[in-house]
Amino acid sequence: MRIMNLLLVAVMAVTLASCSKFKTYNGPEVTRILVYKEDRKMFLMHHDKALKVYDVDLGFAPLGHKQVEGDGRTPEGDYYVDRRNPNSQFYLSVGISYPNAADRAYAHSIGRSPGGDIFIHGRPKLYRNGKEDWTAGCIAVTDREMRDVYAMVNKGTLVSIYP
């Protein structure tokens, strides 16, 4: 009976651990994230090798570079992961360093705010069909995929977003 109880406790512990939204990753370092807006694809790269490829949702106005707050566009250019949010309203998220100096300068020149809070994050139930762009400028993947991204991507990772 004691062995059965120990076995049951062990199975429960493994089950609970596998339900966690936090995964561990011990593979090659993600050296860069590539996002191709037109193709709706994101690649987690180790130098020239794609480690993972994901379909993504973008800002609700996907054409063009994000220029001002509220334009619904996803930025284009080179940024980096500048923060990690384990308590995101969109499951898990990693922040992108938008706006950079050029983004701020342009918005200032036209008397507007460039906006901010651009993330790679999970996808809420309302948008799980993956058939439409819906974010305010962020890049969204499924929650399951976001567990991988969150485990694999470190602060400081380069993010290149192409039209």
Image (cartoon, helix red, strand yellow):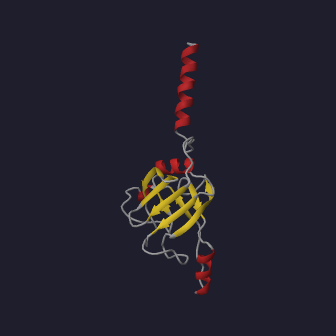
Q: Which residue sits furthest top?
A: 1
Q: Nearer the viewer, residue 142 or 99?
A: 99
What quarter of the picture does the N terminus occupy?
Answer: top right
Q: Position of residue 10 (x, y in %)?
A: 56, 25
Compared to residue 131, the image places residue 145 above or below, namely above
Q: Quadrant of residue 102?
A: bottom right
Q: Nearer the viewer, residue 17 or 64?
A: 64
Q: Position of residue 70 (x, y in %)?
A: 52, 75
Image coordinates for residue 87, horizontal then vertical, percent: 60, 53
- State how many labels appear: 0
* Residue drawn at (60%, 86%) of the image: 109
Q: Quadrant of residue 12?
A: top right
Query: In the current view of this chain or complex, which residue is farthest to the bottom?
Result: 110
- Rendered residue at 55%/48% (across/down): 152
Given the current orientation, which residue lies at the most extreme front position? 48
Q: Left or right of 110: which side holds 42?
A: left
Q: Where residue 52 sits in the image (x, y, percent)?
A: 46, 50
In this rendering, the answer to whether 158 lies above or below 100 is above
At a point 49% along the width and 69% down the height, the residue shown is 74
Q: Is the C terminus in the top left, top right, bottom left or bottom right quadrant?
A: bottom left
- The part of the image, by quadrant, that contains residue 156 is bottom right
